[in-house]
Each structure stands twice: as structure tokens, then as C-alpha cells.
Amino acid sequence: MDNQLFRTIMGSFATGVTVITTQVENEVYGMTANAFMSVSLEPKLVAISIGDQAKMHSYINSSKRFAINILTANQLELSKQFAGQLNSNLEVAFDYYQEHPILKNSLAVITCELFNQIDAGDHTIFIGKVIGVKHEPSEPLLFFGGKYQELNK
Ligand code: FAD
């Protein structure tokens, strides 16, 4: 099967956008990700899929914990920053929630301890046990057809 066709088909599934954050030896790292899903209610588990080449892959292997920051439509620039899509780097100030670094003003934050990880081709599925959640209702940032989108636009 053609890779481009596969990408196009996967991109036709509309998602929100998250930034995964973690901390290793006092350094905070972030990475934009939309491969995120809810997995289990009892216990509360979520999953993210991270490319094996991404630096975030080794950071989570070291820290064994991460936060999922669900972005609002106002955080488009942060999504680009943490996907390496900006020409000049943004200085990002982080908040702390339950000792996890998180992005200020996100729509929601889910803090996790690493529960399990599964090799899946050129990605690894990291399953997180949910430790805490935070919610500030707002318009979500969306991703569809390889482009950022907003509701009703
Ligand atoms: P880097 O490339 O080093 O970091 C990414 C960017 O974040 C760099 O520009 C870096 O300067 C910046 N950054 C990191 N920490 C900080 C900090 N503390 N302060 C300021 N800036 C910082 N890839 C996946 O594996 N899984 C996905 O689900 C996924 N979904 C995506 C969804 C979207 C909408 C987009 C646009 C990209 C997605 N990607 C996904 C691709 C992924 O975001 C990029 O490949 C990313 O650059 C990989 O980051 P990295 O961990 O290798 O680290």
C-alpha cells in the first residue's frame, strides 16, 4: 500500500491536539501529539503513540511519567513550537500541577505515571495511569486533513 494514501486516510480522522510534557533532571520537554486516546475507566488509563525517533520517547523512558495538555484554539502557536514547526523558538513558561510541568491555559491536563509500554512498529504506545485531571472549558484546537482547524470554521 502507498504510504501517502495511508497518511491521507489516517489524516481524515479529525482529532484534537495535545502537547505531551515531561521532566528529566530539572529540564522540561514538550512534544505535539494527536495520537492520544482514552483506554480504561477502572483503572483510569490513557495511551499516546510516540515515534521511536522522537526525543520524547527516551525522555518518557527516563522520567516514567508525563502530562497530556489538550490545547485550545488559542494555543496554535504552542502546537507549532512543540512540533518543531516555527522558525524561531518561543520561550515557554510552564506551570506545575502535582509536580508535573504543564502548559498554562490548556483546555484540559491529564497527569500520568507510566503504566505500560508496547512496541508497535516504528512507534511505541505509552499507557499512562491517570493521577490527576484539570479542566478549563474552552474552544479546542483541531487537526484534520493535515491542517489545523477550529470548530465552526
Ligand atoms: P524535539 O524535536 O526536540 O522537540 C520538538 C519541539 O519542541 C522543538 O522545536 C523544541 O525546541 C520544542 N521544545 C521542546 N521542549 C521545549 C521547551 N521546554 N520549551 C520550548 N520549546 C521546547 N509525533 C508522534 O510521535 N506522535 C504523535 O501523535 C504526533 N502527533 C502530531 C500531531 C500534530 C498536529 C503535529 C503537527 C505533529 C505530530 N507529531 C507526532 C510529530 C512531532 O510533534 C514532531 O515530530 C516533534 O518535533 C518530535 O519532537 P521530539 O520529541 O523529537 O523533540
Image (tube, rainbow, N blue to C red):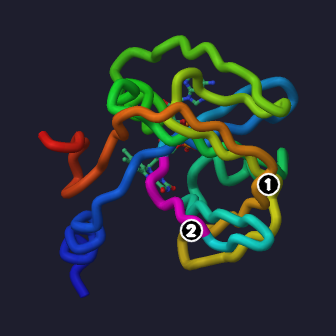
**Vertical placement of residue 94 versus 3, above or below:** above
Instruction: Specify whether residue 114 is in view.
Output: yes
Q: Earlier in the sequence, mark 1 or mark 2?
A: 1
Q: Is residue 148 left or right of residue 24?
A: left
| Magenta stretch, overall SS | strand
Q: Does the closest atom of ligand 1 sit within 8 Å of the Cβ of label 2?
A: yes
Above or below for 25 versus 151: above
Q: Amino acid at mark 1?
A: Asn
What separation in Å lies between label 1 and label 2 (alpha carbons)? 13 Å
Q: Position of residue 48 (x, y in %)?
A: 59, 61
Element type at marker 2? strand
Magenta-tinted stretch: 33-38
Tell me what residue is drawn at x 65 percent, y 37 percent: 134
**Horizontal side of residue 65 vs 120, given as left or right:** right
In screen coordinates, is 125 left or right of 116? left
* Residue named by callout 2: 123
Q: Are marks 1 and 2 in contact (CB under 8 Å)?
A: no
Q: Residue furthest front?
A: 137
